[in-house]
Amino acid sequence: MSTEVAKQKRQRFYLYVAGVLAMVAAVVAVSARDPSGVSFRIGMVLMTVGAAALLPKRANALLATVVIWLLPNIARSSIQDAELFGPNMLLELPPLLCLALFTDLARHSLEGLEAESAAIGTQGAGPADEVDPITGVYDERLLRPALETELARATRFNRQFALVLAGLDSMRQRFDYRDDEAWEESFIATAKLLRSTRKNIDRVYRYGVSSFAILLPESGPKDVNGLLRRLSRAARRASPAEGEPGGPLPCHYGATFFPQCATTTEDMLRRAEIVLRIAEKNTTRVQLDGAEAPEMDPPELHRAPNPEVQEQPPAMLHPELAAQENPQPIPLHVQAVPPPYAAEHTVASQPPAQQPSQPILDAEMENALAELVKRMDETSEMMRDLRKSA
């Protein structure tokens, strides 16, 4: 909606500018009839445009135009002994009034365009409680409801979308050359960069202490790569430059996709966090989730039960159980397959029955990461005390 309104305002602005040029051409045509008054008319055109651009009310601008038209002509009649209220003088008044009117309309249209651009830059957020007060992006608590809504829409219409997490190495950045105030200024500049490079349907959310989440409807790996290229170009052109105090901070990006990689809100957030950790150690600082999610059931199976699927004929049962009155289903032994990122923790010679399951591996990774974060916090606290004492 905001894009359509901005387009209409832009078209009206161009129309008003064309009107201004037409009125200037009309005053020039009057000057061709009276070459001795060219300098006076140039001054009247400039003063009329300035009055219409500076005076807040349109009536005041029109009244100022009449004064601007009258005073130079009175001075000219006294200096050059020209005829006061002659035909040429009366012909130049209507173009000057129209010039003031079109200039005033163009000024108001330009102000509307600037306000619309500012609204799009802040994502057109509604109530103030939906926006993070520091960065101006959407609040973190709105991310999960937005993901659930996008999942329902994409499932119904068989579409895809992407979730991108942008992480900042806040510990390294603060210890290198920033204090807390300068780092917060650069953090805000990073949020502004993410807002400016997104499309109108994309949304940027605050995620944790030093991360952002970008929800990209109708987007696949190719679209995410295009977004990251735009981010890189915008960061290089930023002033101050990327990595400098006041400029955007260096980021690493992890992206996951629906339905190729995840089919639920929890899965998307978990997989996005995993690929974000991998991206932090990559030389390119980018990691796209390439694993495939289990195939989903068609939507009609979730709306109403299918008797043909729930009840099997006796011929489809096990031969030994077909003759029984109440046959029991044959138990299936299903073994959990660890994901690719946990393969390095699995011993190749270990028999399949003794391999750890996915929940155990996830718990071990979470515990190791929690311990690592705890040690980093202790180290940062120690270094902060050393800096204060020094």
Image (cartoon, helix red, strand yellow):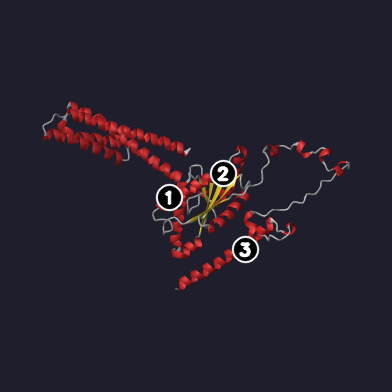
Residue at the outermost front position: 349
Residue drawn at (47%, 62%), measured in percent from left and top? 173
Image coordinates for residue 18, horizontal then vertical, percent: 32, 33
Residue located beneath label 1 in the image: 234
Residue located beneath label 3 in the image: 368
Residue located beneath label 2 in the image: 161
Mark 3–mark 1 Cα distance, whole angstroms, equals: 36 Å
Based on the displayed image, in which of its 4 quarters is residue 308 positioned? top right
Of labels 3 and 2, earlier in sequence is 2
Q: Are marks 1 and 2 in contact (CB under 8 Å)?
A: no
Q: Are marks 3 and 1 in contact (CB under 8 Å)?
A: no
Of labels 3 and 1, earlier in sequence is 1
Residue drawn at (46%, 58%), measured in percent from left and top? 184
Look at the image and tell me in which quarter the C terminus lies: bottom left
Q: Are marks 3 and 2 in contact (CB under 8 Å)?
A: no
Of labels 1 and 2, earlier in sequence is 2
Looking at the rendered structure, the secondary structure element under dot 2 is strand
Residue drawn at (48%, 72%), measured in percent from left and top? 386
